[in-house]
Image (cartoon, rainbow, N blue to C red):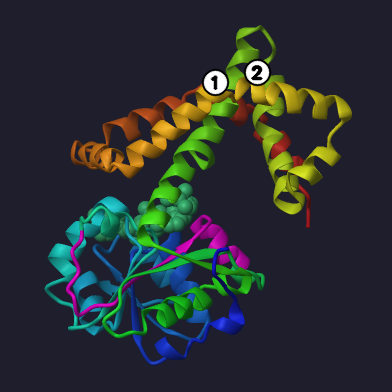
Amino acid sequence: MAKIYTDQDASLDPIKDKKIAVLGYGNQGRAWALNLRDSGLNVIVGLEREGNSWKQAVQDGFQPVHTEDAVKQADIIIFLIPDMVQRYVYREKVQPNMKEGADLVFAHGFNIHYKLIDPPSTSDVYMVAPKGPGATVRDFYTKGGGVPALVAVQQNPSGKALEKALAIAKGIGATRAGVIETTFKEETETDLFGEQTTLVGGVMELMRSAFRTLVELGYQPEVAYFETINEMKMIVDIIYEKGFTGMLKAVSDTAKYGGLTVGKFVINEEVRKRMLEAAEKIRSGKFAEEWIEEYNRGSPTIKEGLEEIENSLEEQTRRRLKEIIERGKPKS
Ligand SMILES: NC(=O)C1=CN([C@@H]2O[C@H](COP(=O)(O)OP(=O)(O)OC[C@H]3O[C@@H](n4cnc5c(N)ncnc54)[C@H](O)[C@@H]3O)[C@@H](O)[C@H]2O)C=CC1
Ligand SMILES: CC(=O)[C@](C)(O)C(=O)O
Ligand SMILES: [Mg+2]
Ligand SMILES: [Mg+2]
């Protein structure tokens, strides 16, 4: 059984007198900086340029400074910049300026697990990985909840790394839910697998494939959109609240029978073989290699993919239906 920590198991004490540098003010950076500050901790936001993130941080009441200046003062340095950028910022801005023994903290294990960053042996290296998007990390926290997270320790010269990881998890609200102890390897590999096969890649392509099939068969795109894309949220919300059992109770017997049989026919052994292949590619480091190469070429695949989706019939249809969807949303 996994080891789970909650609020009673975590104290802010190990970090309450420390200066915490949050590098990056995007999805996770903004959520962490605000939550940690609201938890009474001493946060400084470090950024590369005086761009949009800088403006946003100022608007939120921070006084951001350049990365190297944040790093110089920091006891704890948290990497909340894109995974592909972390090693350059580490090499050029963090490593030359950090106090000896300052902690290096990550929200995802990529750079440590694939050895893109090689931290000094004097630093504690640990991770707090929220299992949810940054906006949700902030939203749940302000409403008294928290997004669950994983914690892991990679290097522990102080002997206090786990306590500090739990303190940060508490500061962002994660221990209000629960925090599971893991390793950099397990977090990195499962996170990549999840986003590729289900959360980002799998769900999106499943919905798109169903949408396209209906449209190709001559059904109206608007009808196909409501059926295969828009209603997904309602079904997933019920799974989130009540599990698969609860979801199956909420749908008709006709849907139960069709779902239980045709679901397995469509998502078959072939698909699971491909999931295994995806896992193998992650575990061997091949995916990481491919992604680094893509990034070094200026991320052409991401650019093309985003453009294709933006112009797709699915998104065009969504834009046409947007007013209906907005009007129907619950008002409180
Ligand atoms: N997006 C999410 O909700 C989740 C992200 N993570 C992890 O959190 C970390 C941060 O991811 P996100 O919050 O999505 O990042 P993001 O893409 O939102 O990061 C943007 C921030 O990084 C800064 N930045 C961008 N390029 C930079 C560069 N070349 N040099 C310096 N700063 C630069 C931007 O100014 C901005 O402040 C990653 O390790 C990611 O895997 C973990 C859980 C969920
Ligand atoms: C939001 C999250 O947890 C992801 C999908 O793993 C990510 O953005 O990398
Ligand atoms: Mg991820
Ligand atoms: Mg994730």
Q: Which mark is residue 313?
A: 1
Dot 1 beta carbon under 8 Å from ligand 2: no
Q: CA distance from mark 2 to mark 1?
A: 8 Å
Q: Is residue 223 magenta?
A: no
Amino acid type for the residue under numbered disc 1: Leu
- Give coordinates of residue 300: x percent, y percent: 27, 32
Q: Residue at x 36, y 37 (%)?
A: 280
Which quadrant: the N terminus? bottom right
Q: Is residue 87 above or below residue 35?
A: above
| Front-most of residues 115 and 208 | 115
| Front-most of residues 76 and 163 | 163
Which residue is outermost to the front? 1
Q: How many marks?
A: 2
- Give coordinates of residue 152: x percent, y percent: 40, 68
Magenta segment: 117-140
Q: Residue at x 19, y 64 (%)?
A: 90
Q: Residue at x 49, y 86 (%)?
A: 12
Amino acid type for the residue under numbered disc 2: Pro
Q: Is residue 134 above or below residue 235?
A: below
- Give coordinates of residue 160: x percent, y percent: 37, 84
Report helix, strand or loop for mark 1: helix
Q: Which mark is residue 221?
A: 2
Which quadrant: the C terminus? bottom right
Q: Residues within 10 Å of mark 1 (few under 14, many from 20)?
A: some
Q: Is residue 127 magenta?
A: yes
Q: Can residue 217 be seen at all in this image of the molecule?
A: yes
Labels 2 and 1 touching (C-beta < 8 A): yes
Q: Which mark is residue 189?
A: none
